[in-house]
Image (tube, coloured by chain):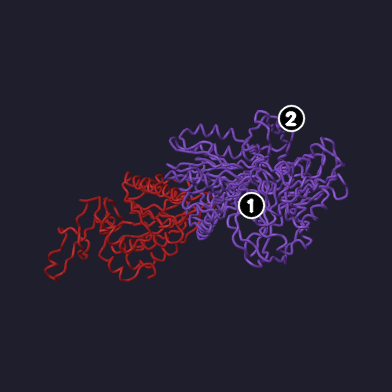
Chain colours: A red, B purple
């Protein structure tokens, strides 16, 4: 497994993607449905994981097997988790690699929770799309879909999202992007995603070189996506102004996410993926 | 701060192309970034600030501009004024000798010195004490220590350069003694540094600061003037005009006028060595002779003219008393001389007084005051006190330039015995031997005196060719002031002129070259005129008799107007560098500026290297 090693995957086994909304699925799953009360018919058992409602423990099996099992009912539905990765030219390099690694970890968690996972690469259109897969037996395919995403092209999130297939009942959307869109507009695509998704988790990918650019002197900065350039004499004062602007800009994005009910995580690519998944995202409630 | 080469500041215009290069060609390094979304906004704000905003942040440009500024300043040769510091008293010593009349600076060197001294006074804080001393032929304190600096300013403005030779020596000695009267006083010397060497002067810890005045070094001048009998004409004279050029050769013309009538004109190339030009005067000529020199690139006018007075030559009345036959014969063959030979007992006071010179081979019992006398051997009643004789002394040296020793060789003179001098009584030795002076000479109470320390017959002098030549020269020198003498009544400016006279003071009058009366001093029948600082003809009325004499600068020291870079005061004797003041008008700082420029250059290299790593 190129994206994640086996020991890390083992640590992910006991995690689940959180679900804050009640939405209907198309098949039996492990999430609580918004259609509560329609059916209480027993469907299956599954091993207990911390956080499960103790009311659903099957005490007979506990007495008989000495292990904890919970009962699943028919009205509990499955979910589609769609992983959207911005693969425009601005994401080239460590940002895209980091996004793929985090996405792989979260898809492993989602597949472990019997969710269906779809993967899409977005640039100025729908660069790639892998339809939803279910079960960890398909994890390899999901990972291959992630690895098949390559950087290139510009950014047109509106056009790319318009080309995305819709999922009935809405999906849990994990968006990995740097928000470096040529028109600077980030709220419109977020609003669209929120409308189409049951839940939206936004991962804002930043490279250290963007947070603290190692630039100085008379420079001509060339945009990796558009090829446009801007002449600048970079001084420590100008760098400080840039970093202040960067913080304001990312705070704006965070506030937009908050208004729309999405979670926002700013990911610096020099932070270890393992720490991010096991601690940061759990703390933020993205996984449990 | 002032600049010695202000035109060097024009090099500052190089800043224009330097800045233009930065405007026209800024080499920007291309860097690919994920997006210029955030940078664009900053760049727009950056451009709106000011078009020259980026220069404010361009360290390399500022370093180069600083480097250029330092080099430009160094080219202009800035001078920091060495004015008195807080609490310092100042002794202002101004050189007023003839070379300070040079016009290489405006209005002349003295005017420049006064301006600089006034600027220094302006920079002094109130309550500071200052004194003013002038150094020239005479040194005097013009204004003693005072806090009224206005008095010193007024005195400075009233100064004028004299037409006479002088030295800073006495001025420095006086200035330093004044400075020692205060705890923290500095002697400020405003001068071109001309005159005799001062390296033997030591002033301890008293600071002396030299404000150099003047720039030009080139000047031609008449450095000697001599009127002699013509060897070819019985009653004719020859005028010897000696001219010299300092600071490189130049073509010059010397003209000679007799009572404003042109007598002759010579062209000559003047250089470092003096050139003598001879002009024949008509037989029996009388009047005022004026020599004029004209040359290009000449900065001191007053040394281009010299005067002499010509009277119809008459024979000098010489009295020989008790002289040996060799001497008597040598004097008798001199056709300038009307010789009277007497034995000691035959000499009367009247005969003495009517003689222009007396040669004494034997002592006489008469008052010789005011009589030009050559004592031929130690004599009772002579001017010099002698010790017991020493045998066979050898001649060591003699003053070849003295008129009495002109054209003489005294090598291998044999002397049987010589009386060493106990007290020369103010006479100076002209010929020195291993046992003491052989010949002394000098002036006393208006008369000239020669003293031989051995009787001529006690040596082989009378048998030598030198003897008649020595006597010929002695007659000429002793009778120089006599009426009708060939030399032309010439003195150098600043030196006193004197003559013996029986006329009452009320019947005496001395007029200077400007026609104004001049002070004189009459004591024991000796008339002395001391105020002879102006060049030209001085006219003297002695009752019904009218005389004149000429005062000329005739000074190679003053004609050499090249300003000294340093006063070189006792360099080896004093550790304080301050006393070695050697700066024109203050402290030149161009070396420090260039050193700073070198450091800036290193800094520029470091900055450039750092930028190259980005």
Pointer 2: what residue? B544
Q: Taking B603 as reference, is B545 above or below it?
A: above
**Residue placed most toward the observer, A111 or B238:** B238
Label located before the other in sequence (2 or 1)? 1
Give residue B585's position: percent from left, percent from top: 57, 45
Q: Taking B81 as reference, is A76 above or below it?
A: below
Residue A169 in view here: no
Label 1 is found on which chain of the structure? Answer: B
Q: Residues within 10 Å of mark 1 (few under 14, many from 20)?
A: some
Q: Quadrant of residue B127?
A: top left
Pointer 1: what residue? B382
The image quadrant where one finds the C terminus of chain A is bottom left
Residue A133 in view here: yes
Label 2 is found on which chain of the structure? Answer: B
Residue plotted at (34% across, 63% down): A272
The image quadrant where one finds the N terminus of chain A is bottom left
Report the side of A128 relative to B73 (left or right). Answer: left
**Residue placed most toward the observer, A216 or B402:** B402
Report the side of B552 relative to A240 (left or right). Answer: right
Report the side of A116 relative to B112 (left or right). Answer: left
Does the CB distance between marks 2 and 1 fall below 8 Å? no
Give residue B583's position: percent from left, percent from top: 57, 49
Q: Quadrant of residue B297?
A: top right
- Where disc 1 sits, the SS reads loop
Q: Quadrant of residue B482?
A: top right
Give residue B204's position: percent from left, percent from top: 47, 53
Give residue B309's position: percent from left, percent from top: 77, 39
**Residue placed most toward the observer, A4 or A216:** A216
**Residue placed most toward the observer, A103 or B514:** B514
């Amino acid at each position: 497994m190129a994206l994640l090693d086996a020991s890390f995957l083992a640590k992910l086994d006991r995690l689940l993607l959180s679900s804050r909304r009640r939405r209907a699925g198309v098949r039996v799953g492990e999430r609580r449905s918004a259609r509560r009360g329609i059916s209480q018919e027993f469907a299956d058992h599954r091993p207990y994981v911390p956080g499960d409602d103790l009311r659903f423990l099957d005490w007979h099996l506990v007495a008989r097997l000495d292990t904890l099992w919970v009962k699943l009912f028919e009205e509990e539905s499955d979910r589609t988790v769609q992983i959207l990765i911005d693969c425009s030219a601005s994401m080239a390099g460590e940002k895209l690699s980091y996004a793929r690694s985090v996405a792989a970890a979260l898809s492993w968690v989602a597949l472990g929770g019997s969710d269906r996972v779809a993967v899409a690469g977005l640039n100025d259109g729908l660069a790639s799309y892998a339809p939803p897969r279910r079960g960890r037996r398909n994890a390899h395919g999901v990972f291959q879909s992630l690895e098949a995403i390559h950087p290139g092209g510009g950014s047109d999130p509106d056009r790319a999202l318009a080309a995305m297939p819709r999922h009935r009942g809405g999906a849990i959307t994990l968006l990995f992007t740097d928000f470096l869109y040529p028109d600077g507009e980030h709220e419109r695509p977020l609003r669209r995603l929120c409308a189409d998704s049951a839940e939206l988790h936004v991962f804002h990918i930043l490279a250290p070189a963007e947070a603290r650019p190692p630039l100085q002197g008379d420079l001509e900065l060339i945009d990796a996506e558009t090829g446009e350039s801007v002449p600048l004499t970079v001084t420590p004062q100008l760098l400080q102004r840039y970093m202040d602007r960067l913080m304001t800009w990312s705070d704006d994005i965070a506030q937009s996410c908050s208004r729309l009910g999405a979670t926002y995580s700013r990911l610096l690519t020099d932070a270890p993926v393992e720490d991010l998944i096991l601690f940061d995202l759990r703390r933020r409630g993205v996984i449990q | 701060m002032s600049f010695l080469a202000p035109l060097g500041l024009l090099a500052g215009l190089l800043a224009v192309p330097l800045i233009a290069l930065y405007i026209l060609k800024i080499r920007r390094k291309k860097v690919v970034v994920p997006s210029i979304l955030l940078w664009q906004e900053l760049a727009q704000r950056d451009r709106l600030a000011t078009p020259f905003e980026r220069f404010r942040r361009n360290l390399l440009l500022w370093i180069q501009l600083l480097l250029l500024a330092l080099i430009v300043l160094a080219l202009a040769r800035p001078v920091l004024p060495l004015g008195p510091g807080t609490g310092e008293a100042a002794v202002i010593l101004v050189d007023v000798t003839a070379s300070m009349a040079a016009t290489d600076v405006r209005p002349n060197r003295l005017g420049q010195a006064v301006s600089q001294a006034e600027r220094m006074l302006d920079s002094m804080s109130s309550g500071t004490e200052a004194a003013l001393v002038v150094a020239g032929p005479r040194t005097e304190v013009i204004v003693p220590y005072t806090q009224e600096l206005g008095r010193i300013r007024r005195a400075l403005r009233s100064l004028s350069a004299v037409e006479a030779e002088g030295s800073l020596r006495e001025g420095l000695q006086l200035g330093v003694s004044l400075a020692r009267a205060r705890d923290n006083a500095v002697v400020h010397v405003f001068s071109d540094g001309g005159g005799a060497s001062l390296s033997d002067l030591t002033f301890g810890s008293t600071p002396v600061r030299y404000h150099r005045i003047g720039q030009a070094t080139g000047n031609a001048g008449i450095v000697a003037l001599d009127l002699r009998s013509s060897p070819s004409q019985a009653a004719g004279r020859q005028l010897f005009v000696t001219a010299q050029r300092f600071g490189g050769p130049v073509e010059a013309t010397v003209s000679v006028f007799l009572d404003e009538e042109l007598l002759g004109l010579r062209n000559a190339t003047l250089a470092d060595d003096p050139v003598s030009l001879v002009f024949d005067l008509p037989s029996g000529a009388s009047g005022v002779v004026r020599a004029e020199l004209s040359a290009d690139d000449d900065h001191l006018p007053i040394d281009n003219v010299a005067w002499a007075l010509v009277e119809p030559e008459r024979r000098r009345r010489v009295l020989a008393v008790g002289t040996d036959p060799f001497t008597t014969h040598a004097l008798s063959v001199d056709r300038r001389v009307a010789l009277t030979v007497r034995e000691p007992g035959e000499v009367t006071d009247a005969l003495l007084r009517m003689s222009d010179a007396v040669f004494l081979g034997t002592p006489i019992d008469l008052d010789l005051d005011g009589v030009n006398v050559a004592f031929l051997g130690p004599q009772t009643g002579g001017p010099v006190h002698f010790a017991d004789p020493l045998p066979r002394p050898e001649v060591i040296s003699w003053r070849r330039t003295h008129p009495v020793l002109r054209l003489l060789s005294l090598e291998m003179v044999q002397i049987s015995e010589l009386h060493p001098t106990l007290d020369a009584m103010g006479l100076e030795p002209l010929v020195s031997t291993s046992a003491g002076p052989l010949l002394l000479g000098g002036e006393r109470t208006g008369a000239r005196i020669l003293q031989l320390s051995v009787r001529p017959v006690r040596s082989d002098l009378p048998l030598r060719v030198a003897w008649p030549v020595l006597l010929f020269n002695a007659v000429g020198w002793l009778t120089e002031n006599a009426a009708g003498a060939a030399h032309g009544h010439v003195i150098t400016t600043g030196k006193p002129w004197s003559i013996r006279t029986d006329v009452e003071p009320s019947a005496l009058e001395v007029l200077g070259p400007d026609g104004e009366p001049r002070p004189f001093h009459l004591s024991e029948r000796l008339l002395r005129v001391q105020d002879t600082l102006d060049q030209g003809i001085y006219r003297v009325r002695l009752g019904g008799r009218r005389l004149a004499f000429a005062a000329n600068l005739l000074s190679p020291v003053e004609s050499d107007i090249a300003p000294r870079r340093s006063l070189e005061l006792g360099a080896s004797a004093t550790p304080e560098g301050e006393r070695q003041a050697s700066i024109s008008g203050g402290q030149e700082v161009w070396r420090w500026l260039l050193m700073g420029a070198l450091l800036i250059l290193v800094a520029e290299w470091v900055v450039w290297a750092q930028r190259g790593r980005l």
